[in-house]
């Protein structure tokens, strides 16, 4: 019989509403430092669940002998080694679906900002430059009639595609495999997708299979009028190659919500005018984060009640 109030370790910085929800349901120990420092041997031996947003080292999992389940706050669980967890018999859950619409909205905003330079136009107005030196210059690109190539046509990619169609763009995609339920043209390789696209939009979940997949060749195929948008994972892009391509004009611009080594953004990337940089905010509205926190807690509750998990990781691969 499971304990009525199992010990849940919240590992690292965690959403406040999500933490409060866990505290309502379980005994919680919050290790903000993303270490096990200060946690006694006895407490470590008691931890049955970990709730984490981002990286959970394998050594941490291994230092918790009674660990049964990891609840990942976020749909992309590349920070948790699910194979290692499986080997140890530890279940892993994530938070798909509840953030799909929010992330898709942000992706469209990022596309529009990048294509129409709205961030620079906004500072032109705010700084008084409009009055001092006249209107903001005409932008090089507009969105209509463009071809958008989506890498990763899962739930989020599809929600982005549906939104973008309303802007009169054409959609094509590259995925692990072709989908039989969509009519968009499929490109078997990322390079072919980039070649065909005006805008290459990364919505893939990240992880070893796609690490640095957007490399110098893909960027060259995108071309000097091409725009890269990334709302998936920074590690999917070879960041030094991207910086080089933006500096040299191999591609025209990039709109990025994610980076290879967050929260660090390379100085050279920050110095570039042809970039829009967001601090990983695609799902960051309070409404959505509450839903994500509740889903983490619901999965843990179900686990300890012996019920079927709502969103176990293997079913959640198509972020
Ligand atoms: C996710 O859920 O994977 C997002 O990146 C978090 O905002």
Image (cartoon, rainbow, N blue to C red):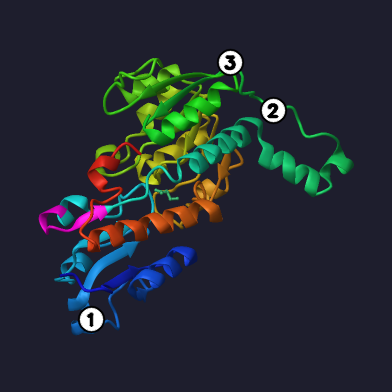
Question: How far apart are the alpha carbons under marks 2 and 1?
Answer: 59 Å
Check if mark 3's residue and mark 1's residue have beta carbons within 8 Å. Answer: no
The answer to whether residue 102 is above or below residue 64 is: above
The answer to whether residue 31 is above or below residue 255 is: below
- In this rendering, does residue 19 appear at all? yes
- Whether 91 is among the magenta residues is yes
Question: How far apart are the alpha carbons under marks 2 and 3?
Answer: 16 Å
Q: In this view, does 128 lie to the left or right of 293?
A: right
Determine which residue is flagged by label 3: 145
> At 74% across and 46% down in the image, what residue appears?
123
Residue 304, percent across and down?
23, 63
Question: How far apart are the alpha carbons under marks 3 and 1?
Answer: 59 Å
- In this rendering, does residue 284 appear at all? no
Closest to the camera, between mark 3 and mark 1, is: 1
Rendered image quadrant of residue 158:
top left
Q: What crowding class fits label 1: few (fewer than 14 Cα within 10 Å), some (14-19), or many (20 or more)?
A: few
Q: Determine the secondary structure under disc 3.
A: loop
User: Of the residues under marks 2 and 3, which one precedes in the sequence?
Assistant: 2
Magenta highlight range: 86-92
Determine which residue is flagged by label 1: 43
Q: Determine the secondary structure under disc 2.
A: loop
- Whether 155 is among the magenta residues is no
> At 27% across and 58% down in the image, what residue appears?
302
Closest to the camera, between mark 2 and mark 3, is: 3
Determine which residue is flagged by label 2: 139
Closest to the camera, between mark 2 and mark 1, is: 1
| Residue nearest the viewer, comparing 229 with 5 | 5
């Amino acid at each position: 019989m499971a304990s009525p109030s199992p010990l849940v370790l919240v590992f690292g910085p965690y959403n406040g509403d999500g933490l409060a929800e866990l505290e309502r349901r379980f005994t919680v120990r919050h290790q903000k430092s993303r270490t096990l420092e200060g946690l006694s041997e006895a407490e470590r031996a008691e931890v049955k669940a970990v709730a984490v947003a981002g990286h959970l080292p394998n050594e941490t999992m291994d230092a918790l002998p009674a660990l049964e389940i990891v609840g990942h706050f976020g749909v992309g669980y590349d920070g948790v080694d699910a194979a290692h967890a499986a080997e140890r018999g530890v279940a892993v859950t994530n938070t798909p679906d509840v953030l799909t619409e929010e992330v898709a909205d942000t992706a469209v905003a990022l596309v529009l900002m990048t294509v129409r330079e709205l961030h620079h136009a906004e500072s032109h107005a705010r700084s008084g430059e409009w009055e001092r030196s006249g209107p903001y210059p005409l932008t090089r690109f507009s969105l209509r009639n463009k071809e958008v190539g989506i890498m990763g046509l899962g739930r989020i990619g599809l929600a982005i595609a549906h939104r973008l169609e309303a802007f009169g763009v054409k959609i094509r995609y590259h995925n692990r495999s072709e989908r039989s339920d969509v009519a968009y043209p499929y490109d078997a390789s990322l390079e072919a997708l980039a070649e065909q696209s005006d805008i290459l939009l990364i919505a893939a979940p990240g992880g070893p299979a796609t690490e640095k997949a957007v490399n110098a060749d893909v960027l060259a195929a995108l071309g000097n009028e091409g725009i890269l948008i990334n709302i998936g994972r920074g590690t999917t892009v070879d960041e030094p190659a991207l910086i080089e391509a933006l500096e040299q004009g191999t591609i025209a611009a990039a709109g990025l919500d994610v980076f290879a080594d967050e929260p660090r953004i390379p100085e050279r990337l920050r110095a570039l005018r042809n970039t829009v940089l967001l601090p990983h905010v695609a799902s960051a509205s309070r409404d959505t984060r509450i839903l994500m926190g509740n889903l983490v807690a619901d999965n843990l509750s179900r686990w300890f009640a012996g019920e079927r998990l709502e969103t176990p990781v293997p079913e959640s691969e198509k972020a």
